[in-house]
Amino acid sequence: MANLQDVAKAAGVSKTTVSRYLNGSLELPAKTAEAIDAAIRRLEYVPNPHARRLSLGRSDTIALVVPDIASPFFATFVAAVEAEADKQGLSLALHATLNRPDREITYLDRIRQGHVDGLIFVTNHAGNAALAAKLNSAGPCVVVDEDVAEARVPKLFCDNEQGGYLAGRYLAEAGHRHVLFIGGIDQMISGARRFRGFERGLREVAGETAKIERSCGTYTFEAGREAGRRFAARTQARPTAIFATSDELVIGLYEALGEAGLVVPRDVSVMGFDDVGPLHLFAPAVTAIRQPVRELGKRALELLLDARPVDPAKPPAEALLPVTLVERHSVGPPPVVP
Amino acid sequence: MANLQDVAKAAGVSKTTVSRYLNGSLELPAKTAEAIDAAIRRLEYVPNPHARRLSLGRSDTIALVVPDIASPFFATFVAAVEAEADKQGLSLALHATLNRPDREITYLDRIRQGHVDGLIFVTNHAGNAALAAKLNSAGPCVVVDEDVAEARVPKLFCDNEQGGYLAGRYLAEAGHRHVLFIGGIDQMISGARRFRGFERGLREVAGETAKIERSCGTYTFEAGREAGRRFAARTQARPTAIFATSDELVIGLYEALGEAGLVVPRDVSVMGFDDVGPLHLFAPAVTAIRQPVRELGKRALELLLDARPVDPAKPPAEALLPVTLVERHSVGPPPVVP
DNA sequence: CGCGTTTACTAAACCGGTTTACGTGCTTGT
DNA sequence: ACAAGCACGTAAACCGGTTTAGTAAACGCG
């Protein structure tokens, strides 16, 4: 394969000239320029990106670390980031952690080693100090969707509190006074915020006597199924509505409720969160809080690129994207107690 | 940041020694080895990957080109490839073409320029000669899921013909004699194979008088909605069953049928293809041909790594993965004609 | 003692770009 | 006629590894 030297020789100039001509730091008379162009075409020259990167000290690549690519939420997020990266002429190196903290650390080390120019980091479990320390020393980096408390980097979230609030009000307005919240453990800031908003919204309408139960766990199908099974097994004083705070939880929950012969919303009302999957086709279509996932991806990259010159004095930017309530058919009045 | 030279100086040896020691091409007495280890720890040395890649001429990165990452089918596929790549210590550069042929060409050019060590290429539309030519000169490369006819590279598909066959037989056995096939245009080999199998399966049970209609188009929600609306608008001699050959088509179709007030499977039976999304939660749960998508991803990478020494004499390997029929509740007997 | 072998290591070239700092040779102004 | 200035470039260092082809010193052995 032809290199810069070959082109230079073929065009009768030095490789400095070719290099500088190609990246615009040198004006050349038409004749010389054409000779170089011709040589490039004839030799089918393409610059070697590895040499380029070594020389320039950057890779025009950013890394994206997410818990799981197959999940619709993250898949959509990744798609949005990729689209934006492509627009900026950047490549995307994709890594899935599958929620294993050791993997997160490994990837962060790789980033620091200069593999990439920047990092968009998404985790799915409670952050810890070790992780935060790595993030702080990882170079240009943003944290998205789930907070890592001690990380001093730009952050981008959906307005989880507002989402919880909307759901709480909505269920209370539908008449529910005893509800079940299924969601992440309290150490997960997104989960805590959703719960806090939910409680606030519910109590604002239903008052202090309203009863909120909470089932903690991961945002997985299995956790949804579990919670659904436990719910279905109860025979008395059962909540009349469930707020399942991710698409996966809703799907698992629907499965379990269906298996147990419970009909939504006749026997129990259900609200979802995320609304990325085709929740409108479920039986019945799921009323849910929708996260603007594509926007999240787009903004994540913008934030990363903007954040390049990090000012250690002032705290990094933290952006909040609005959520919306999508009304469908999975919420009704509470069933009449027999 | 410390480099090899710094480490060498600190350990009192030459950088050759450090380099060779680190990659195992040199045995050192314990004392020297320890001096080097200590220097590395003290300076927090990590090798510069760009220099490494330039020197070695490889990047330990493979590129994955898919039409759209957000679609559950490709998302799952990407997840499977990423998992396998990680196992092999390879990075993954992800690119979405969004079905734009110019993008496909652009990415293939980048690959050829040495960006990556290998390429897994997935397209979603009929291939053409220009694309095939690029693939043939792109270096190590495999084509997955949808064929690119003239490309002489290893290929990996699901057994589309068998999938069509299973669906055809199944609908015929349920009593259907007039069916609608919604799927890719005939130039798409996957679509053509599914149709051929479908026809064969149906006729094997229902005989030559069975009537098959075909609605060609892309594998998109919109195409599914369109086909569904056209179907619903017909008042007489309407097919009694529909075979929608992708998850997206099924979803769009379900939407349109629901809007038109048609009930599945009372008014019309539906079969799907892919079965990656949560089709079991739709109303009613969709009977579908399931593609082994994760297996497809895993095998794609294996095939790529195996194929490294390409032998120009014999034709490249072509693997076919089996599909299965997942029976649910969207197929019933044909409605009685009023 | 002298010669071959092993041990322990290294100088320098190489990968293929980018960049700094410095010529040439020709025109122009005075 | 001579310096200044411009147009048109270039030599060589640099990025940070890997690798080839050695060398110097110690050691074993007849």
Image (spheres, coloured by chain):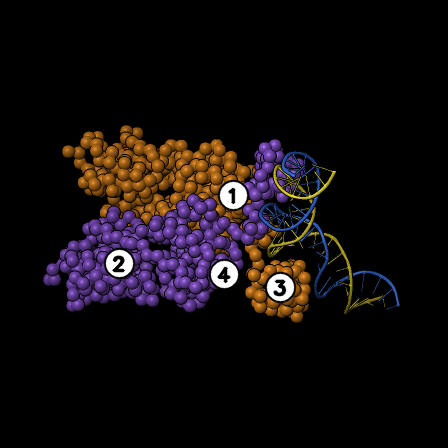
Chain colours: A purple, B orange, C blue, D yellow
Q: Nearer the viewer, mark 2 or mark 4?
A: 2
Q: Nearer the viewer, mark 1 or mark 2?
A: 2
Going 17% across and 68% down the picture, which residue do you hit?
A208
Mark 1: amino acid = Ile
Where is residue A14 shown, x and y percent of the image? 65, 41
Q: CA distance from mark 2 to mark 3?
A: 53 Å
| Both marks 4 and 1 on one chain | no
Mark 4: amino acid = Asp
Q: Nearer the viewer, mark 3 or mark 4?
A: 3
**Host chain of mark 4:** A
Q: CA distance from mark 1 to mark 3?
A: 34 Å
Q: Nearer the viewer, residue B231 or D7?
A: D7
Kindly state the secondary structure of the residue where label 4 is placed: helix
Mark 3: amino acid = Val
**What mark, if any, has residue B111 been given in the picture?**
1
Where is residue B156 shown, x and y percent of the image? 45, 43
Going 32% across and 61% down the picture, which residue do you hit?
A190
**Host chain of mark 2:** A
Going 37% across and 51% down the picture, which residue do you hit?
A299
Residue bearing the label numbered 2: A162
Q: Nearer the viewer, residue B262 or A320?
A: A320
**Host chain of mark 1:** B
Where is residue C3 shown, x and y percent of the image? 85, 61
**Host chain of mark 3:** B
Residue bearing the label numbered 3: B7
Kindly state the secondary structure of the residue where label 2 is placed: helix
**Dividing the image into 4 quarters, which one contains the N terminus of chain B?**
bottom right
